[in-house]
Image (cartoon, grey):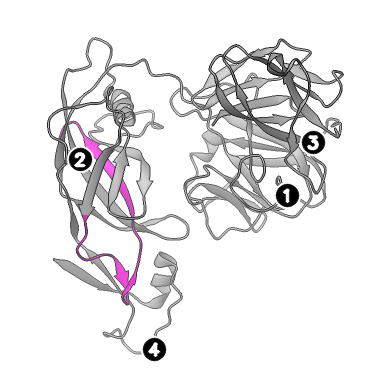
Amino acid sequence: MIMKTIFKSTILLAVAGLSLFTSCKDDNDSNPTLTQPTTFVLNELSVTGNIDLEKTTAPINLTWSQPTPYNNFNAPVVPTYWVEMSPTGQFTKAFDANAEDNTGADYFVLDETFSSGTAAEINAQNVNRTMLQMLGWTETTTPALQKLSVRVKAAVRDASFNEYFPIYSNVITMNTVPYYVELKPADPEIWWLIGADIADGSWGGDIGKCVIPLQTIDGIEYDNKTGQGEIQWIGYLGGNGFKLRGALDDNWAAQIGQNDGGYVKNDGGSGNITVSEPGIYKITLNTIELAKVADGENTTALKIEKYDGTASVFSGMAIAGSFNDWSDASMTPCSTGWENHDWYITYDFAAGDQVKVKQAESWDFNKGGSFIDYSQGMYVYGVSNGDNLEISEAGKYMIIFNDITGYIRFIKQ
């Protein structure tokens, strides 16, 4: 069964972002219409038996069908899908990892969203970790078996990522074998700089070449559950405009732009952030405060101010270490059209390799220290003439370095 709801064009413009026009006549069959199903079918799992969440390395595949898709005047409107799971079989209150009180929470929503096709690939370890967080299991209380009720939610999102017309699938059952693992503190939440003032100014998605991560700050504590806290970047801004992105794979769902001089959260229609004059600036973002702000609202969690320190301009930067007899492997400047203070390189290391970041053809400026591990690699608050950095896990890493703060980030490729 479907329902047909009739909207005036102004509502459609806000909800679906469609450029439509109607006459001044009363609503009739010629008006724009949005057709949506009232439910859709989530198929039973193709696998039978218990799913061992620790040993399952292949994705858990969910598929569903929607005989009548969302559409407007026969133009498809692509919905977003979320996977929801309940250990109690109830779906009355969602677990929120950022909330101080989750009393009564009886289901959780997986982090991933899906916006194309009618299928989702679910990571078994993510399911297990979220259950551990929600249910507070210990090594002795983790059960041998856990039945999960699973459903899929669909909704239409507008340009500001507001949700409209949510519907839900039927519920299926997934039998799981959970396992206990000590939950590590969450990685510090990192946002990314992108735009005409950043790196090559192309608004592309390549790390180093096009986008630059904000940095954690030495001495700042980050929330163990959410990874939220204060992060920063110091570098040159030319006044050409930029934005901040919360992730590089979320289709701009998390972003910060500018409206009427204020910084606005998750508003797809916001303008670029600009500074009044070129120079070295410090950008600081408090992600704890940002999380308290509703989508589309202005936020004071972002601060952009002139840098009051000194910043040397280097003609080149390199990495050197035991892997190349301490000779220079040149890093690439992120910004090539204006004053640069960020550098990157991708390199293959063996376990046990030692490395430092240094000024090209000189040891007058060099950074070492002690690594801090995170899920995608490691980072270090670089210390002048500090200890050699030792690679514990072999592999290819992208290295991002800021020559003002000394912050070095290794991203496992």
- Pointer 4 residue: 24
The kind of secondary structure element at disc 1 is loop
- Pointer 3 residue: 307
Q: Point out residue 31 in the picture as x, y percentages from the top left corner.
A: 32, 82
Q: Nearer the viewer, residue 319 or 26?
A: 319
- Pointer 2 residue: 150
Distance from label 2 to label 4 (Cα)? Answer: 46 Å
Q: Point out residue 245 in the picture as x, y percentages from the top left corner.
A: 56, 45
Distance from label 4 to label 1 (Cα)? Answer: 46 Å
Q: Point out residue 348 in the picture as x, y percentages from the top left corner.
A: 60, 25
- How busy is the neighbourhood of tag 2: few (under 14 within 10 Å), some, or many (20 plus)? many
Amino acid type indicated by mark 4: Cys
Distance from label 3 to label 2 (Cα)? Answer: 51 Å
Distance from label 1 to label 2 (Cα)? Answer: 45 Å
Q: Earlier in the sequence, mark 4 or mark 1?
A: 4
Mark on residue 90? none
Q: Residue at horizontal 67%, vertical 55%?
A: 261
Amino acid type indicated by mark 1: Asp
Number of callouts in the render? Answer: 4
Amino acid type indicated by mark 3: Tyr
Q: Residue at horizontal 27%, vertical 29%?
A: 103
Q: Point out residue 239 in the picture as x, y percentages from the top left corner.
A: 77, 52
Quadrant that contains the N terminus? bottom left
Q: Nearer the viewer, residue 404 or 89?
A: 404
- Pointer 1 residue: 197
- How busy is the neighbourhood of tag 4: few (under 14 within 10 Å), some, or many (20 plus)? few
